[in-house]
Amino acid sequence: MELKKKEDEEKFHYTYKDFIEEGKELCEKTQKLFKFCINELLEINYIKANINISESIILELDILFSDVYSLPVMYFQIYKDGIPYDFDNYIKEFPSVSPDLIKAAIISKENHPLTGKVYNFMHLCKFNFLMKDIKNISNILFFWLSLILQIFNYDLVKIIQI
């Protein structure tokens, strides 16, 4: 799949169909690290993962497709020794391998659309900044996620090449 840009804008055109196809490929290629899920009641497809960042840190994340922005969005929760851990404290204790990425990421709290619980939410207003240098990427979702996970010192590329 080739990255699509609208002619009159610098924004990416990414569809729900792209999200489904790339999400299934991501789940298949990462050997069950990510799971493709369907909430039948709400008719929402999403990707779920629990990633062991370290011996004591677990990153729980859900990636959904935003109809409003036509982009993937990530809701996440950090746990340290099984207890919810504040994102700001995490960044202080475990500096990111990419300080520029931290500056570009705007993270706030928001109710998770599937659970109703308060989760960290990565804003999409900086999406174009994160994706500015890409030309032809076969799996935009994988590329985007591999960038985002650098905030947590997690190298998705080492796990699998898509």
Image (cartoon, rainbow, N blue to C red):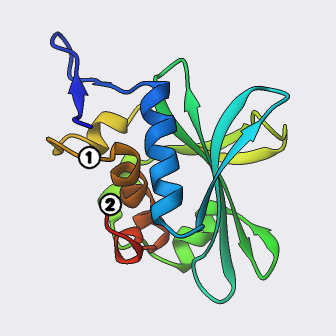
Would residue 157 appear left or right of 87 to someone viewing this image? left
User: Is 95 rendered above or below residue 64?
Assistant: below
Sequence order check: which comes first, mark 2 or mark 1?
A: 1
Residue of label 2: 162
Q: Confirm whether residue 123 shows in the render.
A: no
Would residue 138 appear left or right of 57 to someone viewing this image? left
Bin the neighbour count of mark 2 within 10 Å (Cα to Cα): few under 14, some 14-19, many 20 and up. few
x, y percent for residue 1: 27, 37
Mark 2 to mark 1: distance in Å? 8 Å
**Depth check: 157 or 119 in front?**
157
**Depth check: 94 or 153 in front?**
153
Q: Quadrant of residue 84?
A: bottom right
Check if mark 2's residue and mark 1's residue have beta carbons within 8 Å.
yes
Would residue 124 appear left or right of 44 to someone viewing this image? left
Q: Amino acid at mark 2?
A: Ile
User: Is 56 rendered above or below residue 3?
Assistant: below
Give the secondary structure at mark 1. Answer: loop
Residue of label 1: 138
**Quarter of the image with the C terminus in it:** bottom left
x, y percent for residue 55: 65, 89
x, y percent for residue 109: 69, 43
Q: Amino acid at mark 1?
A: Ser
Extreme residue toward the top, this view: 8
User: Is 90 rendered above or below residue 35?
Assistant: below
- Residue drawn at (33%, 66%) of the image: 98
- Residue drawn at (15%, 13%) of the image: 7
x, y percent for residue 66: 55, 27
- Residue drawn at (16%, 45%) of the image: 133
Q: Confirm whether residue 155 shows in the render.
A: yes
Would residue 66 appear left or right of 154 to someone viewing this image? right
Give the secondary structure at mark 2. Answer: loop
**Depth check: 142 or 38 in front?**
38
